[in-house]
Image (cartoon, rainbow, N blue to C red):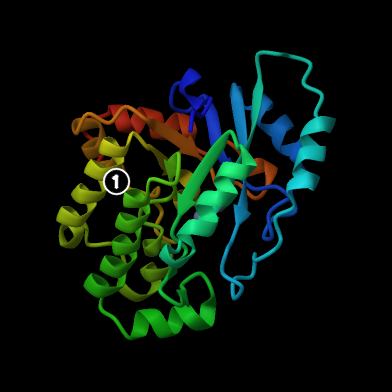
Amino acid sequence: MDPAIPAFTPGEADTHVHTRHSCDSEMDPAAALQAARARGLRALVLAEHVDFDPADQGYGYYDAEAVKKTFAEFRIPNSEFRIFRGVEITYQPQYQDAIREFVRAGRFDWVIGSVHLVGPDDISRPEQRERYFTARDQRRAYGDYLGEVEKLVASGLFDCLGHLDLCKRYGHAYYGPMDRALFAPQVTRILRGVVEKGMYIELNTSGLRQDPGEPYPSLGVVREYLALGGDRLVLGSDAHAPEHVGYAFPEMLAAIRSPWSSS
Ligand SMILES: [Zn+2]
Ligand SMILES: [Zn+2]
């Protein structure tokens, strides 16, 4: 894969936005584009959901032809601005072959791999979330999630690792803030894998608008990635509405550079 994103420095492009081509968003693609330009971004990736599990609410929703039609309709007066056709694929090890074929055939500009399920448990769904978190302590619940992330990285299927520790979004109500010390060795393994595979890693700012009140992953993890020699950081808002495109990018860039910021 040869994504076009390297032309941009972190924060110039929003690499993770969902429009009405995703099962859980109604955003008009043109409104996303307009918002990105208004915020001074130089590029935008429409990274629409693709799910391979028939039990997933997004299964079968992605319509490649409809997306292509949207891109054919875009009129971008200022050629400085770029818009890319991406996908956010829910990674599950059992669908690895199908994902590989989908990515090969789709010829996407940008492919994010994300963990949304741990085994059969879709932790984003309220009833499954309750079952998952009440049956496990934090060490096990987040450790199992991060174990799936390790498999995702090892698969080599994706350009970018999506929201490394999204588990804390749903676990926050059960455990409070994530106890990062519990997972330090596992997170280091993930980061080393990302660097070795030449993957991109996303700082997903949606966590700032959600219960954890910090990005996915936290800034300490981003700094560790940089210290390991990683130089493929991108910023993604995970916006489902125009007002969230490019969300908190300037603040996050400033905080990464500040040695005094701990979040
Ligand atoms: Zn996601
Ligand atoms: Zn997303």
| Residue at position x 17%, y 62% in the image | 182
Instruction: Tell me if residue 115 can be seen.
Output: yes
How many numbered circles are shown? Answer: 1
Q: Which of 41 and 196 lies nearest the eye of the viewer?
A: 196
Instruction: Tell me if residue 210 can be seen.
Output: no
Residue 81 percent across, percent down from the top left: 66, 19
**How many residues crowd around disc 1 within 10 Å: few (fewer than 14), some, or many (20 or more)?**
few
Q: Which residue is mark 1?
A: 263
Residue 115 percent across, percent down from the top left: 43, 59
Above or below, 85 relative to 165: above
Please name the amino acid that badge 1 sits on.
Ser
Question: Can you tell which quarter of the image residue 178 is in?
Answer: bottom left
Above or below, 55 relative to 189: below
| Residue at position x 25%, y 74% in the image | 140
| Residue at position x 65%, y 13% in the image | 80
Above or below, 79 relative to 159: above
Above or below, 94 relative to 103: below
Disc 1 is placed on an element classified as loop
Q: Is mark 1 within 8 Å of ligand 1?
A: no
Judge left or right: residue 122 versus residue 102.
Answer: left
Residue 162 percent across, percent down from the top left: 44, 48
Q: Which of 31 and 210 lies nearest the eye of the viewer?
A: 31
Residue 198 percent across, percent down from the top left: 33, 33
| Residue at position x 51%, y 69% in the image | 124
